[in-house]
Amino acid sequence: MQIPFQKTISHVAHVSGRGYWTGKNVSLTFLPAEPDTGIVFCRKDLAGCPRIPALASHRTDAQLRTKLVAGQASVEMVEHVLAALYGMGIDNCLVQCDAPEMPGMDGSAYQIALAIHQAGRITSDRPIKLKQIEKALRIGDQQVYVEASPSQQPGLTLVYHLDYGPGSPIPSSSSSCLLSPEEFLGSIAPARTFLTQSDAMKLQASGVAQHVTHRDLVIFGDSGPIDNQLRFPDECSRHKLLDLIGDLALCGHRIQGMVFACRSGHNLNGQMAEQIRTLKMHTRESLIKAA
């Protein structure tokens, strides 16, 4: 059995944009990191440049986004950044930021994933940290849940079923992938954030996302996307896969198995990451013996 080794980026990468919630400009700098570092955010704008590890133990509940807290420092809307790093096969990276909220970009993770891709990858001599799903795990109820199960297919297989019910303008769909950098960059990273027009109006009425327009993400009216077109027929469930990948990355390990999510959001996804993180870690030696 071939055991992969940990990877980091070869060169420094940069992206910048505005946060959806605050509208503040933010710049991200992705730096190579040593083996076993994991993914760590660094708030350059705060005294002492505090670091926040991207781990489920630092996750806190937040509306429609994933937020991490360490001491007095926090970062939020991190799911697309984490998905891009995990999806592009990066295990170790320092992400410097000069604001608490990550950039919304075009509602997708494509520009971030592309920057990581263009930075290249370096393989270390340290084997990956792997969590192998050996028995079924399930969180949620009969209608909304996340389930992880063993898989004979190497790597991480993901399935997401989206269904807001017959009265929603957002169409039901299901998407799946066997995660790889190529699959992520081409089929998952371009899928954008979406909202109904009524939900978007409520958010703006509450004082957030004042600068966001119909071109900054996908807004669904009664007749479909407003002033926009879908990139994929199942773009919404693909974006939910994107969010799922970013949230599962908080387990801090590569995952061997299958994860099926039905109508789940960040909170439930994060709870599954916490459960996976508690599983026994497989070493290179144990995996070779099992093979």
Image: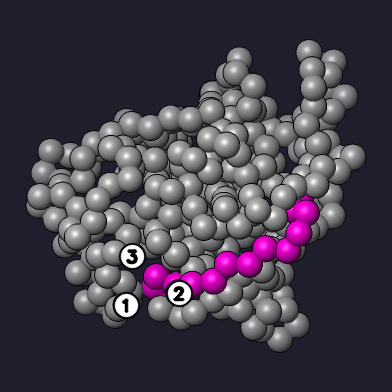
Residue 14 within the magenta-colored segment of the rendering: yes
Q: Which element type, helix, strand or loop, lies under badge 1?
A: loop
> How would you rate the neighbour count of disc 2 (Cα within 10 Å): few for under 14, some for 14-19, many for 20 or more?
many
Quadrant housing the C terminus: top right
Q: Position of residue 86 (x, y in %)?
A: 62, 45
Name the residue: 68% across, 37% down. 254
Residue 29, above or below 147: below
**Residue at 67% across, 42% down:** 89
- Can residue 25 be seen in this snapshot? yes
Task: Give the extent of the magenta segment.
Answer: 8-22
Name the kind of residue labelled 3 in the image.
Asp
Q: Which residue is mark 2?
A: 18
Q: Amino acid at mark 1?
A: His
Cα distance between the residues tagged 1 and 2? 9 Å
Q: Which mark is residue 211?
A: 1
Q: Residue furthest bottom?
A: 47
Depth check: give the residue in front, 60 or 249.
249
